[in-house]
Amino acid sequence: MDGYQSIAMLAGSGGMRRTLRAPIGCVGIGLHSGSKVRMTLRPAAPGAGIRFRRTDIGIEIPARYDYVVDTRLCTALGTPGGGSARIGTIEHVMAALAGAGVHDAVIEVDAAEVPILDGSARDFLFLLDSAGYSESALPVGVLEILKPVRVTEGEGPDAAWAELRPTQSGPGWSAAFEAALTIDFPNTAIGRQSLAVRITPDTFRHALADARTFTLAEDVTRLRAAGLARGGSLVNAVVVDGPMILNPTGLRSADEFVRHKLLDVVGDLALAGYPITGRFSGYRSGHALNNRLLRAVFADQSAFRVVEPDWVDASPSSRGADYLPARAPAKARVLATAA
């Protein structure tokens, strides 16, 4: 896209499934509840995928797009059948796991929300690095986008949209996930910002991980009256009041706002359950459109294919149910292809 900033990019990641070397935990505050939350990141068996566990009520929820039950101001997972159990504000830890190339892990929390920490993925990435990583002998499956899929919200030239399309191919081109986004907040210090990044562990760490969530000062009172943002502060969010940034330390980068929105894209699309080979583009996209986009992709059998190690049953009808190995690793096979 014309006008997009280009960030130095490395070859796409792949290889073997990765988990944590050891458990690691922290205590933080829930952004919306304002309550103290204890979180522990734990290793998981090869092929187990990412799962969230509510230790206070004994519920476990897979980190999958079709378990998303709420996208207002965060991404929240819920139990099947409309049960009341949920885990909210998962997008930053999901982004950190995806950015670090972790495919199998359990995230335990003792409340209905992941702690916000500093409002970015930086602290989650620090925890993952501190725990260390362990690679298995099992290869990573890939979700390959085969044709453009777009979802929109609103009408006219200012309508928000999000799209996934195939990446370029040819000699010397390595498969990867690319993301390009434009945001537009008129009459504020945010303004219009655009950014394009080829997501690798290196670019995620140095370009996106420390970008914090943000809000408008005028929205804070309304959100708290609705029982939201009770744990929000200048410690864990950038607050914008018209042309001013209220945080005493200012911004971490001039375009921190669009960087954070791209961080959210990484976390939300990680709920596909596989690393994506494709290009995301969006205009004013947020959690709702990001999730609608994944649902639209998986609803169209001709839009994608899943190349998965032969030891996993991940057909579109059952993909991600438990991610349990069925037999010894064999050569990769295509589990879903264009019709």
Image: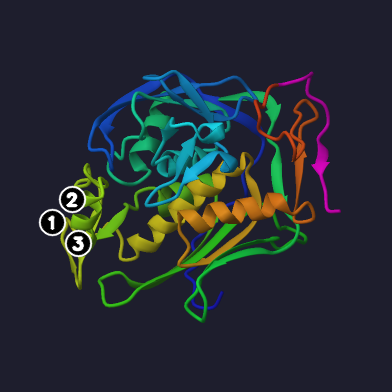
Q: Is residue 16 visible?
A: yes
User: Does residue 333 sit above or below 20 in this rendering?
Assistant: below
Q: Disc 2 to disc 1, how far (Cα)?
A: 8 Å
Give how far across and how far down residue 64 sits, in percent. Answer: 57, 38
SS for callout 2 = loop
Name the residue at 38% across, 22% down. 24
Name the residue at 52% across, 76% down. 155
The foreground one among 103 and 339 is 339
* Mark sitting earlier along the chain (2/1): 2
For disc 3, the marked residue is 217
Q: Which mark is residue 248?
A: 1
Q: Are marks 2 and 1 in contact (CB under 8 Å)?
A: yes
Q: Is residue 9 toward the left or the right of residue 70 in the image? A: right
* Mark sitting earlier along the chain (3/1): 3
Q: Is residue 183 toward the left or the right of residue 199 in the image? A: left
Q: Quadrant of the N terminus?
A: bottom right
The answer to if 324 sits in the magenta stretch is: no
Name the residue at 37% across, 30% down. 127
Specify the amino acid type for callout 2: Leu
**For the magenta stretch, what is the residue range?**
325-339
Q: Disc 3 to disc 2, how far (Cα)?
A: 11 Å
- Which of label 3 and label 1 is nearer to you? 3
For disc 2, the marked residue is 234
User: Does residue 265 sit above or below 96 in this rendering?
Assistant: below
Specify the amino acid type for callout 1: Pro
Specify the amino acid type for callout 3: Ala
SS for callout 3 = helix
- Which of label 3 and label 2 is nearer to you? 3
